[in-house]
Each structure stands twice: as structure tokens, then as C-alpha cells.
Image (cartoon, rainbow, N blue to C red):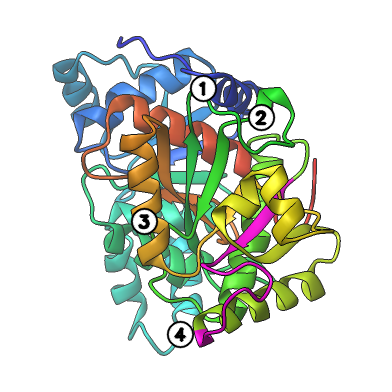
Amino acid sequence: MAVVAPKNQIMEGVWAKARQGQKRIVLPETDDARTLVAAEIIDKVDLGKVILLGDKDELNQKAKEAGANIDNLEIIDPLKADKLDEYTEKFFELRKGKVASLDDAKKALENFLYFGTMMVKLDDADGMVAGASNTTADVLRPAFQIVKTAPGISLVSAYFAMIVPDCQYPDLAPDEEKGFFLYADSGGNPDPTAEELADIAITTCETIENIFNAKKAYAAMLSYSTKGSAKHPRIDKVIEATRIANEKRPDLAIDGELQGDSALVERVGKKKAPGSAVAGRANCLIFPDLDSGNINYKLTQYLGKAEAYGPLLQGLDKPINDLSRGASVEDIVNVAAIVAVKAMVPYGKRD
């Protein structure tokens, strides 16, 4: 078994919470050796209960070839599952008008991604991790069709958890939380509306508190302007998004429009945004579009030598997460831990 352990204090906290929760995580991509090796590790380090999809004899042979031991793991064959008829009827109901017949519904569930998503939808699993051997579109299609977004959330967004070594920012963060940020949306929505940007900020605040156990979320709605220093329709979108977010969730610390230095540096924040509850404290950096979000995460990763976990999905009613097709075994294990913790706290609640 490959040796996998959390690399930093942030992921140590995620692993600890996952161990407490013992959630059921379905891994449908059992055609991929990385999935089978990761499944053994998740079980051995006690991050949750793994469910593999496929024919048991075939999977045991594949696991042997991959050097993995899956003897203790639950295996369900979607083609012979006891609940196949129940899933078929429910899927047909959910996709009424989109799926022509029960036979077509059953055929769709031969796809392990669809079957695994139905398990999550019907509470036979708490979360799903896939994407090592399927495209993002393939993973998200059943998630959007079956699970859909959480109540009150208009869209699914993607964030990166960024851990920057030897970082002194944000200035006003506790020492143990300096250098840890969520960047959103950095992998999903190219040009969110003001309403969508507000929801991205809200879900990111909940993510950093509930999954990564930050003492408090501080979301900076980023722009090239701080509090009216420039004028442009792009800035107006950020200002409107801030207003909407504060109206929807006045309990959260969300402020904008803020430049990056105002968000992170106390002396700059005091000068440019006096009275802001977020300036100098921001641990959730909310980008106005995917260009800025994706560019910034990659620059931080390589120039700042940061650890970047993601893209991680937020906003679905139940946790399903995509992986890069270049994902390592370690990536699969860590994403499974994050999904397990997300399954512990629905949106709108705090543990």
C-alpha cells in the first residue's frame, strides 16, 4: 500500500473530521488502478466507508494487478444490484420528459457515474468522487441532472484550497490560519452574474468554516478598484454582488469591492477601505470571473510555491467531486476526505 498522509495542518484537520464522520464514499471508476489503490488507503487510514462499483471477481483481479487489497470493501455491481429497479424508477421520475422509457432509464444506470450519483441522491452513499478516468462534463452531467444545487444556491462553483508556505497574510488572521485561502470561482463559471457571484461568496464562506474549520470566513469580493477608486460596469457587478450576498446572508463577513492588497494587508485596508470588516482579514478570495480566478491560482501555485487542492465543487445539494484525469492516488484520498467532511454539514448550517 502506498504511504499517504496529510502534508499540512489544514489537511490534518480535514482528515480528523472525516475520521469522526465515517461517511460512505462511492468510487465508481474502478477501471482505474489509482482508484483501487486509493480505496484501500481510505479504508486503512479510516477516512470513511468506501463503496466500489463493479463486478466483484473482476475488481479483485484488477486490485491484485494494481497491488491493492480491497477484501474489506463493499462492492456493488450496478448491473445486478438489489436496488436497480428502485433506482430506475426514481431516475425515470427525476428525468421525466427527458428519458423516454424505463428501459432507457435502466440503460443510463449501466453507466457507473449515473448509478453512483443515484446512490448519493437516495442516501445509500454520502458522497462520490470521480474524474480520474472521466471528463469533468461526464462527472457533472449526472450530478446536475440528479442531485442538483442546494436550496437557495443558484449554481455550482469550483474553488481551490491554497496553502502558501511562509506567508504572513492575511495580516489579521490567527497565526495558524495565515497563508490559507480559498480561491473561487477558479475552475467553473467563466463570467458569473452578480447574483451568481453572491452565491459563490456565500458557499465559499460556508466551505472554509465547515470543511476547513476556519475560525471565521472573511470573503473579499475582488476587483481592480477599492470602494469607488475606479468606475466600470465590471466593478458595478462586484458591488451589486456584495449587496446581494449581504442581503441574503447578513451573518457572514462579505465585503467589496476590494483590491487584493486591501483584502490582505491591514495598513492598506485601513487606508482604502476604512471600517471594512474584511480588509486585512480575507481568507476567501472571490474573483469576478474565471479568467482572474484561474490565472491567480496558477500564479500562486507556481510563483508562491503553494499547495493547491482542487478544483473542488461547492453548491451541490449533496457532495460529488470531480478529479483531474491526471490525479494521483494522494489526490483521490484527499478529495475523498474533503467530500466526507462536506457530507457532515448541509449548506446553511454550522457544526
Label 3 sits on a secondary structure element that is helix
Give the labeled residue for mark 3. 294
Gap in Å between the C-alphas at discs 3 and 4?
Answer: 37 Å
Looking at numbered disc 4 in the image, what kind of residue is underneath it? Lys
User: Vertical placement of 162 versus 78: above or below?
Assistant: above
Q: Nearer the viewer, residue 317 or 186?
A: 186
Any part of residue 188 in sight: no
Residue found 52% across the figure and 19% down from its top: 8
Give the labeled residue for mark 4. 96
Q: Is residue 317 magenta?
A: no
Residue found 77% across the figure and 42% down from its top: 216
**Residue 219's disc number:** none
Q: Nearer the viewer, residue 122 or 253?
A: 253
Label 2 sits on a secondary structure element that is helix
Q: Earlier in the sequence, mark 1 or mark 4?
A: 4
Say if mark 4 contacts mark 2, CB within 8 Å.
Answer: no
Give the labeled residue for mark 2. 177
Q: Earlier in the sequence, mark 2 or mark 1?
A: 1
Q: Earlier in the sequence, mark 3 or mark 4?
A: 4
Any part of residue 307 in sight: yes
Q: Earlier in the sequence, mark 4 or mark 2?
A: 4
Q: Nearer the viewer, residue 257 or 137?
A: 257
Q: Position of residue 250 (x, y in %)?
A: 85, 66
Q: Position of residue 99 (x, y in %)?
A: 35, 82
Q: Nearer the viewer, mark 1 or mark 3?
A: 1
Label 1 sits on a secondary structure element that is loop
